[in-house]
Amino acid sequence: MSTSQAVDARSADPGGAAEPATVDPPARARRSTVRRRNLRTALLFISPWIIGVLIFIVYPVAYSIGLSFTRYSGMEAPTWVGLQNYVTAFLDPLVRTSVGNTVFYAVIAVPLGLVVALTLAIAMNQNVREVALYRTIFYAPSLIPAFAMSFIFIVFLNPQFGVFNRILNVFGGSNVNLLGDPTGVKIAIILMAQLGAGNAALIFLAGLRNVPKTVYEAARVDGAGPIRQFLSITFPLLTPVLLFNLITGVSGALQVFTEAYIVTNGTGDPDAGALFYMMYLYKNAFGFAELGYASALAVLLFLVGLALALLIYWLSRRFVNYDVEAG
Amino acid sequence: MISRRSLLTGATAAGLALGLGACASYPDPGPNVIRYWGVGAADKDKDEQVREAFRATDAGKDAQIYIDQVPSSGVADMSQIITAVRGGTAPDLWWMDRFNAVQNASIGLLEPLDELIEKYEDVSPEEFKSQWIQFAVDELTYDGKLYGLPCTTDARGLMYNEDLLRDAGVDLDLFDADQHVLTWDELSEAVEQIVEIDDRGNYTRFGFAPWLGEGWPYTWAFGLDAQAYDNDTATVTLDSPQWESVFQLYADWAERFPYATVDAFMATYQPPNAPPTQTAMFSGHLGIDITGPWQISANEKYAPDLPLKFTYLPVAQEGDPTYTWSGGQCLVIPAGANITKTLWEFLKFYAGYEGQSRVVPQYGNLPTNLKAIEEGTYNPKAELFRKMLPNSTSRPPLPVGSAMWDTLTRTRSSVALGSRTPAEAVADNQSMIAPKMDLFEGYRMPDTYGQPSPVPGS
């Protein structure tokens, strides 16, 4: 049943929530009072979130926008400089470098992350006896904090003792320090991010389990094999989940920080190869005491993130399929 | 059965108690209360030794000193202290890397000490400051005011493994600091003798590269007369020919010993964030490193049997003067601190002869207090570095120090990797820092900066 059919069916239901044709005034007043009371109760229940959003998101964002037009060290009163921070950002070669690094990361890490997460989800969805154990094993790496994962990767990539170089040696390659190369360090951080794919995989898994079995049964009757079923049923019906994971993935990619901070000791080197946008922003704020400039960088990141989210939403109308719900 | 009202009241009370309990751990200010952010967890005992010694004096008998160890996330990462100051929970005293003093003073993060000297001391600020070595005082001076008291200091030199060099056939007399100062050519020849390569092209034994250890651009800049700032014209001079020669040094060595191969060697035997026990030097794979006296305590602790010795940094020509630079720590009063006479007395005690003579020998570093230097209250193995002090200096005390350090370090790796020429690197550095310094129009470093710092008995 399509969404529009479902709505029509609910509207036709005489016991549904549709308003009767005539209502006497005292009843309407009573209903209005009840609604107001319900609204008050509802607002009271969600007030911690409303207050939290106002204090911890709306206020800092507004404050940061204000600071972006000032020179501010974090200590003395901000000095108004107009658009100077934004002009500086567009001229700063390290902004260009950090944007390039972040785009490099996002363009590879996000699609790769979706593929890894979807593969994990399909593996977690297999109808075998030990599925609970497999799900735990596949999800376990996502429980490791990013900083701990970074230290594990440093050992993993050790030129002499690390598994990565041992594999290279098998093929006759000499030892390389991936973390000592401007491109290699980005690739290492992209690989590191894949070990956190378990969260996205869980969301894919929920989507997979939402696909009605009857659809697969019908497809099998029509002679569709596993690949045809995946391409024509599973994937199209997972697109709403894909959209969610895509937007959170892009948002996370724009903010990549922890792994790069740890593996480069906070420098972003060699040769600014791991100087991601957030790292440069952080350096400006807390290393160089230029919070006004860092705020301008944050505002630009916010605008780019917003624009990308809107673009993905706009594009999603072409590929996201909301037609079938859980059967 | 518990009613809903009782449950909600109980839950609210428990939440408040937990929240208030967490807040209550911060001691209230008082005339004898000192809230101190210390050296670091591994050296907490040194802070405690000084605290107990101070409490045994008349000035400190009523002092309540609360020691917290708040490690910084990075060399110039000020997030913790700025957050504490802005949040009204600033410590009264903070153990800080002296290099950050001028930048932190320029943003209003630190309290000047001149008024305290005039208020509590019987001598003029100039006379009071003369208790400490000049370059350390200069590094704490911004706009003519003093923003902290210096504690430890150091100097830079070469550390070499005598056994490894002997095994490689290197003439050890060249490395004997009492007989000779190495030239770059002699060092280069020694490194050729030390290097061993396996059949895959990996270094299994390596000698030296100018970007390893303390081989910062500043280290070689002091030997090549490259100045970062000209006081007379108040301009940044990071694009001078001397600075280009600093980066040329990196380029030349990287041509002979490729950065990626050296980097793979270092990452093998001394990976990033490795524990202090795991160094290429301790494992006998690296012959020569650039380091300072702080290394002595680690050597004694983790490699007591290894014959590790020190000598001067290499010079261009035989007979050229030796050079080095000194960093170190200091004690400062952050903005918003509870400034009392007890605080001043403790600060003076810790940074003065009494405090330094107690803790500096344990660090392996050198004291900045002239009496402590004169009386030799430091590890005897640091004597060579002590001899370097009169001709040493600090990194330039500039309000953009962190940004300058950052750009110099980044372009060092660019040149060593070959993605920038030395000329491009110095142009990048100049264009990155000059606009930042423009905000401090007419800024002058102390006139004594870069001059010799007399040490009694030297």
Image (cartoon, rainbow, N blue to C red):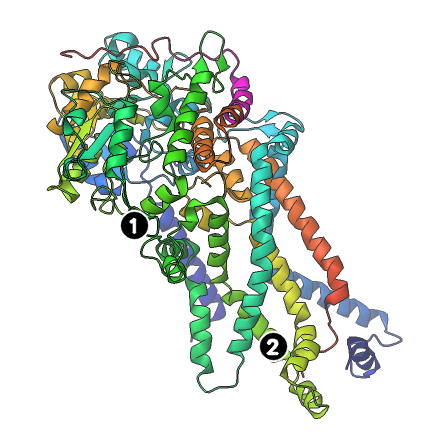
Q: Main secondary structure of the magenta part?
A: helix
**Side (left or right) of B447 relative to A253:** left
The disc numbered 1 marks a residue on which chain? Answer: B
Percent coordinates x, y for residue A165 in the rendering: 38, 57
Give the residue at x 42% y 13%: B143
**Numbered range of the magenta stretch:** B428-445
Closer-to-camera residue (B336/A113): A113
**Side (left or right) of A137 relative to B361:** right
Q: What residue did someone put label 1 on?
A: B198
| C-alpha separation, residue under disc 2 versus residue under disc 1 | 52 Å
Q: Looking at the image, is A314 positioned above or below residue B176?
A: below
Q: Looking at the image, is A241 positioned above or below residue B406?
A: below
**Side (left or right) of A77 relative to B253:** right
Secondary structure of the residue carrying tag 2 is helix
**Side (left or right) of A117 relative to A36:** left
Q: What residue did someone put label 2 on?
A: A208
The disc numbered 2 marks a residue on which chain? Answer: A
